[in-house]
């Protein structure tokens, strides 16, 4: 764990001021609580599982130290807790009955629910992580599903974050695997940011970029050891996830950690929710989404985009009304369709604006391609890394059919206004050809899914 680098990053963070990661540190929670919040009373937020793992011991430790600790707020352990807006409102209501500082004990879902609920209740909070399962511990914003549509809602990261390595290493192996899938997705997230930067849509913030991209290959380089439960590998993974979250704080955006791979993941999650399917861990969907995005990038990089027929592309460019209709028709879930229309129209450009962008693509493509080739890994290598970490690599393993996967290359672009490779292939008129190649005999998905 590079504590000097973490401390330096925290000096630039907007929200998190205290970060303690080590062995046997639950007894230090009171010291961090006092440094971050003074002598305010506390309330533990957990579910049945995390309360048993660490919440109960943490509460007793604080009480033994003379702290005022109110009755814990404990969600059921089963069924799997979902990061829904309804759960946020339920927790917010309970927090408003007290002035206590929330100390959430858990990982992704619990942290996101508490993050937004605490913000809505007008206070900051502390997080005690129990698994290296996602990058949201220190991230700005909470990924919450409201009315069937998953969105990142604006709210501060925790003021203090603690994690006991002895607890992290006892988490189910699947949780480490899902954290690995989430972290490996930073490769394609970085490629998408390179595109947005080169086309002057969203410039790279060097500090946030460096926190994630300088070390992502080191953090993800030993998946076999991670899957075997190696303590050092888990520590490295947690460091990477923490740094990704801090990068999001610095940029006040999820751009440093989320690109086209998350568009696939969020689309599949919302579709599964609407059809009542059992939820799949976030990082597993991101892992397959990373494969989908990487395979698409390979088809893009095989092309020479300096030879685009700009006049023809501008003539064929749809109007805003045509975009509205096509997006509505593409999504069979009404609420998802409604929100996708809003996101798609938010990034709509006119034919004249398209012409300017395509001219920029033509002019800068050799440099863009070189930067992308340096950033990306081969799809087969991504697959090998995911498999070694115990992550799914085939769509069927996360409940996505081949037909659904193919359709996702069209629909995933519509659910967020953020510019990614999905927008590049759409604007340059190569989307259909690239997808055909991916699923044709010899194409990446034909070989993997045996279609």
Image (tube, rainbow, N blue to C red):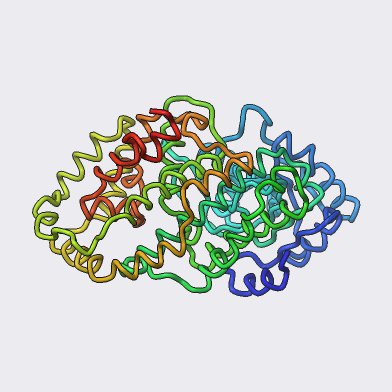
Would you say residue 335 is visible in this rendering?
no
Give left or right: position of 439 versus 379. left
Would you say residue 20 is visible in this rendering?
yes
Q: Quadrant of the C terminus?
A: top left
Q: From this view, report whether residue 138 is shown above or below residue 111.
A: below
Give left or right: position of 150 versus 24. left
- Residue 141 at x, y percent in the picture: 52, 55
- Residue 117 at x, y percent in the picture: 57, 48
Q: Residue at x 75, y 44 (%)?
A: 229
Disc tally is 0
Q: From this view, report whether residue 79 is shown above or below residue 409.
A: above
Q: Nearer the viewer, residue 209 or 217?
A: 217
Looking at the rendering, which quadrant does residue 246 occupy? bottom right
- Residue 226 at x, y percent in the picture: 70, 47
- Residue 375 at x, y percent in the picture: 46, 62
Give left or right: position of 246 versus 431. right
Q: Residue at x 15, y 44 (%)?
A: 322
Give left or right: position of 356 versus 101. left
Q: Quadrant of the N terminus?
A: bottom right
Q: From this view, report whether residue 357 is shown above or below residue 341.
A: below
């Amino acid at each position: 764990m590079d504590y000097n680098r973490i401390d330096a990053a925290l000096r630039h963070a907007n929200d998190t001021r205290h970060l303690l990661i080590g062995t046997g540190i639950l007894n230090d929670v009171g010291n961090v609580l006092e440094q971050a919040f003074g002598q305010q009373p506390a309330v533990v937020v957990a579910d049945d599982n995390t309360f048993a793992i660490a919440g109960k011991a943490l509460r007793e430790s604080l009480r033994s130290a003379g702290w005022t600790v109110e009755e814990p707020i404990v969600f059921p352990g089963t069924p799997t807790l979902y990061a829904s807006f309804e759960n946020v409102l339920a927790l917010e209501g309970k927090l408003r009955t007290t002035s206590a500082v929330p100390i959430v004990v858990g990982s992704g879902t619990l942290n996101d629910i508490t993050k937004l609920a605490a913000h809505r209740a007008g206070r900051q909070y502390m997080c005690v992580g129990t698994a290296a399962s996602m990058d949201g511990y220190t991230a700005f914003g909470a990924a919450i599903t409201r009315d069937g549509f998953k969105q990142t809602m604006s709210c501060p990261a925790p003021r203090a974050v603690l994690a006991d390595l002895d607890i992290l290493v006892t988490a189910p192996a699947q949780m480490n695997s899902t954290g690995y899938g989430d972290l490996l997705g930073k490769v394609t997230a970085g490629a998408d940011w390179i595109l947005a930067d080169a086309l002057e849509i969203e410039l790279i913030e060097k500090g946030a970029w460096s926190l994630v991209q300088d070390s992502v290959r080191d953090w993800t380089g030993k998946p076999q050891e991670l899957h075997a439960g190696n303590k050092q590998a888990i520590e490295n993974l947690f460091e990477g996830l923490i740094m990704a979250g801090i990068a999001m704080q610095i940029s006040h955006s999820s751009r440093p950690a989320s690109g086209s791979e998350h568009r696939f993941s969020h689309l599949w999650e919302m579709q599964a929710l609407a059809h009542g399917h059992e939820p799949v861990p976030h990082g597993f969907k991101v892992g397959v989404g990373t494969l989908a995005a990487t395979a698409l990038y390979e088809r893009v990089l095989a092309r020479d985009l300096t030879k685009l027929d700009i006049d023809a592309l501008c003539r064929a460019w749809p109007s805003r009304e045509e975009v509205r209709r096509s997006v509505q028709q593409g999504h069979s879930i009404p609420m998802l369709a409604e929100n996708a229309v809003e996101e798609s129209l938010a990034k709509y450009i006119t034919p004249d604006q398209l012409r300017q962008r395509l001219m920029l693509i033509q002019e800068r493509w050799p440099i863009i391609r070189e930067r992308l080739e340096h950033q990306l890994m081969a799809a087969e290598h991504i697959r090998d890394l995911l498999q070694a970490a115990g992550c799914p690599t085939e769509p069927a393993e996360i409940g996505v059919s081949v037909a659904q996967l193919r359709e996702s290359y069209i629909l995933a672009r519509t659910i967020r206004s953020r510019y990614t490779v999905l927008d590049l292939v759409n604007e340059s008129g190569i989307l259909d050809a690239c997808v055909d190649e991916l699923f044709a005999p010899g194409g990446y998905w034909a070989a993997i899914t045996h279609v």
